[in-house]
Image (cartoon, rainbow, N blue to C red):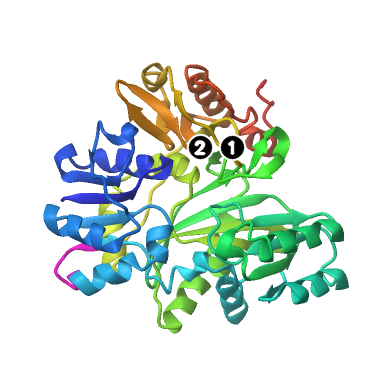
Amino acid sequence: MRLLVIGGGGREHALVSRCAKETGRDDLFVAPGNPGMAACARLVAINPSQPDEVLALVEREQIDLTIVGPELPLSVGLVDRFIERFGADGRLIVGPTQAAAQLETSKAFAKAFMARHGVPTARFRTFDDVEGALAFARAGSFGFPLVLKADGLAAGKGVVIAPDLTAAEVAIRDAMIEQRFGAAGARLVIEECLAGPEVSFFALCDGRLGLPIGTAQDHKRIFDDDRGPNTGGMGAFAPSPLVDAGLHRVIMQTVIEPVLAGMAAEGQPFRGFLYAGLMLTADGPKVIEFNVRLGDPEAQVILSLIDEPLLPLLVASAKGDLASRTVQLAPGTRVGVTVASRGYPEQAESGQVIRGLDEASLLPDVAVFHAGTARRGDAIVTAGGRVLTVVGSGADYASAIARAYDGVAHVSFDGMQFRRDIGQKALAATGQAQVPR
């Protein structure tokens, strides 16, 4: 089987590494990829957000299965174009249509959809005009803190938690007048602020059924102890110790199954990866947001815990035939630490030589996934905000944390920054002693 993975970040490196265990390098393509993937896949320099370029590559290389990593190609209708071009000729793609992808690409759509189908979520209001948003915030209907979300895609940074009215007014004006998030902030969703721990729940879907494939918890803030601005993710661990068998059933019954039934009833059956970001409130799990692809850095910690071949599952998802499938998850834990450039998440530096990659990759129970990297001559250099995710594997969280940070200690570049508390929440939840930072 000839495979194509779309994307070039850490999530896609994790996908490519996993797929490489089931197919040869000559049959595995990634577009555009990054230097870390070159050892196990063939890199193709195309723009994955240009459907015509992707379709041409699929035809030229006779690709059997395409796996879409990031959200942007989904938002511009890559899957729709794929289906139009190839129909039922056997060229499969894993991912939702443009309309189904609105679960992620439009916060307003997702909230209205959840309201229609009884999916538990925070109370909300949606605004297209700045004066209406300001008036609502001033009325204090949801109290404070208040959550403000840009409607469109904002690279994981379009959410502001305003502790008081002054901060809320600033955030509203920043989004809707100053266009801090570009066109994504022209419409604003205002929500009540939920309380509780956050977990991520992942399912592989075929349009009717959702097959749970893992849970995780990520760390959005740039600094230790959840301080500083939001980022795309500074690390994650899996599985989440907060999701026991009972809560797992509740999430499937109240979130995943109603979403799939609702999308099908509205004529947009959902296929591909569905990622539910949940808040575990005193009233039960409630949806914070949906993503319509694997998370990053969550993919780096959940994929290796799927204890059976991945490709048959992906084929079944693309064909709409998961009914007879189950997923066995391996025992043990994974902890991933994201290594970022100086200045991230605002103005990240690039071009710094990265040292120690080979040494870190050779450590037992350590995997290094490239994200923002590039090749310059014989060197690998930084090429973005989030540069690497270093993942440690262990029988328990403490050992996985130790392995991950051992890997990080072997890597260096000028301006390197990372959190030192990734995984500590898992230790606290399971009553284990904290690992020294």
Callouts 2 and 1 close, C-beta under 8 Å = yes
Question: Would you name the residue on which mark 2 appears?
Answer: 386
What residue do we see at 52% from left, 18% from top?
409
Whichever of callouts 2 and 1 sits on the residue coming sooner in the sequence is: 1
Q: Amino acid at mark 2?
A: Arg
| Image position, residue 110 (x, y; %) | 56, 71
Q: Nearer the viewer, residue 430 or 363?
A: 363
Q: Is residue 435 above or below residue 60?
A: above
Element under disc 2? strand
Q: Nearer the viewer, residue 239 or 361?
A: 361
What residue do we see at 52% from left, 38% from top?
385
Query: Is residue 8 one of those drawn in magenta?
Result: no
The residues colored magenta run 86-92
Closest to the camera, between mark 2 and mark 1, is 1
Using the image, tell me which numbered label, if any, was put on residue 344. 1
Q: Is residue 419 left or right of residue 37?
A: right
Q: Amino acid at mark 1?
A: Tyr
Q: Is residue 235 visible?
A: yes
CA gap between label 2 and label 1 equals 8 Å
| Image position, residue 184 (x, y; %) | 57, 64
What residue do we see at 49% from left, 78% from top?
262
Q: Is residue 323 visible?
A: no
Magenta: main secondary structure equals loop
Quarter of the view holding residue 287: bottom right
Quarter of the view holding residue 241: top right
